[in-house]
Image: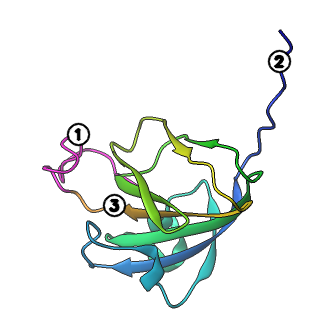
Amino acid sequence: MKHQLRPVQSLDGLWDFSFLGRVNSSSLTPDIVAAWEKALVPSAFDALPDYAGKRGAAVYRRVVEVPSGRRARLEFGAVSIWCRVFVDGAPCAEHACGYAPFTVDIPPANHSTREIAVVVDNRLNFERAPMHAPFFDFYQYGG
């Protein structure tokens, strides 16, 4: 049986970014974002000078190419503290932890240009992410 190698592409680098602050991230969809700037991934947005120490929701966005009709997989090293991943505007996965890697499958589509958006919330919410509490001996970064 002949196996084809599948290309692996790092998505590290500049992504579109928007900090939205104290909005309800549970019902947030990336299409409401009106203004974008650039942010490096991987990074923690609350460690960047403009957002140092800020808590709230943010959105990261990037366009990728996936051959038409093919599936793909996103591998995240970590997203802190909670996130919801969208592909082409549709929610595909949710993750709460911050310290654990996770994967998201991109379903096949009839087009090759795919938009990945990640809604991130770095607020401490014990019900959503019980590993994170407001009183630790270290700062819990988000992004």
Q: Which structural element holds mark 1?
A: loop
Which quadrant does the N terminus fall into? top right
Q: Which structural element holds mark 2?
A: loop
Residue at the disc numbered 2: 3
**Which badge, 1 or 3, is on the more N-terminal residue?**
3
Residue 121: quarter of image = bottom left
Residue at position x 56%, y 48% from top?
107
Above-or-below relation of 94 to 56: above
Reply yes or no: does residue 135 show up in magenta.
Answer: yes
Query: What amino acid is labelled 1 in the image?
Result: Met
Above-or-below relation of 116 to 38: above
One can see residue 40 in this view: yes
Q: CA distance from mark 2 to mark 1?
A: 41 Å
As drawn, which residue projects farthest toward the bottom? 34
Q: Which residues are magenta?
A: 125-143
How far across and down, in percent of the image, does residue 30 sit? Answer: 45, 75
Circles 1 and 3, Cβ within 8 Å, touching? The answer is no
- Disc 1 packing (10 Å; few <14; some 14–19; many ≥20): some
Above-or-below relation of 133 to 54: above
Residue at position x 70%, y 44% from top?
70
How far across and down, in percent of the image, does residue 124 sit? Answer: 22, 57
Q: For marks 2 and 1, give the one nearer the viewer.
A: 2
Circles 2 and 1, Cβ within 8 Å, touching? The answer is no
What label sits on residue 131 in the rendered view? 1
**Which badge, 2 or 1, is on the more N-terminal residue?**
2
Above-or-below relation of 60 to 141: below
Residue at the disc numbered 3: 122
Query: What amino acid is labelled 3 in the image?
Result: Asn
Q: CA distance from mark 2 to mark 3?
A: 41 Å
